Image (tube, grey):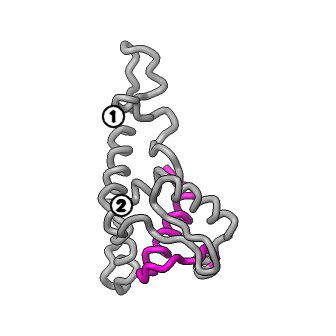
Amino acid sequence: MMFSTKAEYGIRVMVGLARHDSGDPVPLAEIAEHDGLPLAYLEHLVARLRKAGLVDSRRGSRGGYLLAREPEQITMAEIVEALEGSIAPIECISQGPDGSIVCSRESDPAHSCPTKLLWTRVRFSIISTLVQMTLADLVLGAQLPQTEKQPITTGA
């Protein structure tokens, strides 16, 4: 599964807001310039984040955006879902109204999907990671020296 630039840029905006711990609103143009991101696209993403209750906005000459909650209280799952929608590793897997995992290729109960277990576990792992990681974790991780950061291993 590959997340789009919505998730990537949106998380970068949220990290930019979290780094400004002064409590003052941050102009979106400042984050766009600092990270080399397109301002018009960020405005679209911030509208989604605002609708999800993750950021607040202030108008006026000293206006801008700020986090709606403390960075420790905002999970990556909230941000990604606000920007990307429901998280699914493959198109046919989704969450049903009752919370169960549904495969659209299972037309009737007698026809079970042979890969549903795999994709259900992949989805659970992704969501579990996103729920466990907060915005504060990313801000702190960005401040660690390179030698203290853990390498990503694939088990190969």
**On screen, residue 145 above or below 50:** below
User: With 105 as the anchor, is 60 left or right in this view?
Assistant: right
Report the span colored magenta.
1-29
Residue position for label 2: 154
User: With 81 as the anchor, is 64 left or right in this view?
Assistant: right
Residue depth check, mark 1 versus mark 2: number of the one nearer the observer: 1
Which residue shows up at 40% across the image and 79% down it? 142
- Residue 66 in the image: state x and y as whole percent: 48, 71
Q: Is residue 5 visible?
A: no
Which residue shows up at 38% across the image and 44% down it? 123
- Residue 72 in the image: state x and y as whole percent: 32, 68
Crowding around mark 2 (Cα neighbors within 10 Å: few <14, some 14 to 19, many 20+) is few
Which residue shows up at 56% across the image and 70% down it? 58
- Residue 34 in the image: state x and y as whole percent: 59, 81
Give the quadrant of residue 95.
top left
| In magenta stretch: residue 152 | no
Question: Of 65 and 30, which appears nearest the observer?
Answer: 65
Going by the numbered disc 2, the residue's amino acid type is Thr
- Residue 32 in the image: state x and y as whole percent: 62, 75
Residue position for label 1: 117
Question: Of 99 and 68, which appears nearest the observer?
Answer: 68
Badge 2 element: loop
**On screen, residue 113 above or below 145:** above
Going by the numbered disc 1, the residue's amino acid type is Leu
Mark 1 to mark 2 CA distance (whole Å): 21 Å
Badge 1 element: helix
Q: Could you tell me if the residues under marks 1 and 2 are in contact, i.e. CB atoms within 8 Å?
A: no
